Image (cartoon, rainbow, N blue to C red):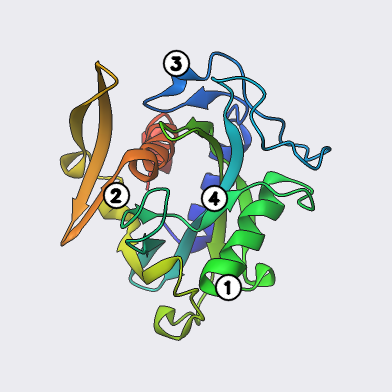
Amino acid sequence: MTNADFIDRLRLVLARMDANSITGDWADLADGRVAENKVEHEHKNAPTAANEKRAAAVLVPLVLREDGTTVLLTRRTAHLHHHAGQISFPGGGVEAGDASAEATALRETREEIGLAPERVELLGRLPRYVTGTGFCVTPVVGLLRPPLDVGTLAIDAFEVAEVFEVPLAFLLNPANHQRHSLAVDGQIRHFHAMPYGDCFIWGATAGMLMSLYRALEETPPAHRL
């Protein structure tokens, strides 16, 4: 499959997805109470109920390399309050000036890794993902074209420890998908993981990648990656 075929296929897959649906290992905790995404109120991200989630967005950056598409990921610094040291997509909470989830994802990506919004070709959204830490995240899929040297990105050293790439083919291979569990408030919660080298990709990041995997698996075999 050529890069052009890949892009066209991915656009079709994302266009037919229900981006308003909610997934995630803690999706049942949302109970339908998710903060608005339209950013119409200055304090919209302050939960009004104990089970309401704060709206957030991340960029799922796909890099079109000659030897295969990769996914751009970050490792968060160890001192952060949320998801410290974990592998994640660039992104964060919706702010009052953000016009959309796409605006949030692009703003946060610029702030975290210094990637200009005009470098990103937006392709669509994956289903929203509810985390156990109180966020309802909209994953926005974006395409990056070379030249792109991750070693020259101006990362925010306070939030980001490193930026790296993982082959998309590795992340979409079921042989690399794992399922783990842990006890949270007396309940057993299950989560996805995709270990890659010394990187343990798990939780929300792995869950959102699984959403992409499932969507692509539902396409006709001739169009799969």
Q: Is residue 76 above or below residue 162?
A: above
Question: Which quarter of the figure is the N terminus placed in?
Answer: bottom left
Left/right of residue 172 with respect to residue 51 in the rendered view: left
Quadrant of res 79: bottom left
Q: Determine the CA span between mark 3 and mark 4.
A: 21 Å
Horizontal and vertical percent position of residue 141: 55, 50
Q: Nearer the viewer, residue 96 or 6?
A: 96
Position above or below: 143 against 164: above
Q: Which residue is mark 1?
A: 115
Which mark is on residue 16? none
Q: Residue at x 67, y 29 (%)?
A: 35
Cα separation between marks 2 and 4: 18 Å
Q: Which callout, 1 or 4, points at the residue further toward the start of the chain?
A: 4
**Tag 2 and tag 4, C-beta contact below 8 Å:** no
Give the quadrant of residue 33. top right
Q: Secondary structure at mark 4?
A: strand
Amino acid type of disc 3?
Asp
Sequence-earlier tag: 1 or 2:
1
Residue type, numbered disc 1: Leu
Q: CA distance from mark 1 to mark 2?
A: 23 Å
Please name the residue that numbered disc 3 is placed on: 28
Residue contact at pointers 1 and 4, CB within 8 angstroms: no
Asked if residue 78 lies left or right of residue 80, the reply is left
Residue under numbered circle 2: 171
Question: Which residue occupies 79% across, 48% down?
Answer: 99
Label 3 to label 2, Cα distance in Å?
Answer: 26 Å
Name the spot of residue 107 as percent of width and height, x first: 66, 61
Judge whether residue 10 can be spotted in this image.
yes
Q: Nearer the viewer, mark 3 or mark 2?
A: 3
Secondary element under disc 2, as helix, strand or loop, is helix
Secondary structure of the residue carrying numbered label 1: loop
Between residue 51 and residue 129, name the one nearer to us.
Answer: 51
